[in-house]
Image: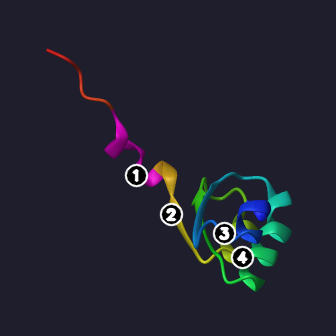
Amino acid sequence: MVSLAWIDNYDVALLVSSDRDFVPVVEFLATKGKKVIHGAFPPSAAELTRKCWGSFNIPAIRERFRRSKSS
């Protein structure tokens, strides 16, 4: 994430993780004008969610991504 941001390869990143080790990364990216959207699994990683530009709750929307059964 950092190396691609450094060479300005993106404006918005999608981070799907509950690892709080990403908090400093997200803070750094914000200083470079990058927006990070957190695909979250609440209540895990609440601090990471707060540091990100935006977030969405994956368990709340997972049913929308179910594959339909073939006939």
Q: Which mark is residue 51?
A: 4
Question: Could you give the CA–CA distance between mark 1 and mark 4, rounded to whole angstroms?
Answer: 21 Å
Q: Residues within 10 Å of mark 3 (few under 14, many from 20)?
A: many
Q: Quadrant of the C terminus?
A: top left
Nearer to us in this view, 57 or 27: 27
The residue type indicated by label 2 comes to Phe
The residue type indicated by label 1 comes to Ile
Q: Which residue is mark 2?
A: 56
The residue type indicated by label 3 comes to Thr
Residue 28 placement, left or right of 14: right
Q: Which mark is residue 61?
A: 1
Q: Which residue is mark 3?
A: 49
Q: Earlier in the sequence, mark 4 or mark 2?
A: 4
Report the magenta stretch's main SS: helix
Residue 6: x and y, percent?
Answer: 77, 70
Question: Could you give the CA–CA distance between mark 3 and mark 2, rounded to whole angstroms?
Answer: 9 Å
State yes or no: residue 63 in magenta. yes
Q: Earlier in the sequence, mark 1 or mark 3?
A: 3
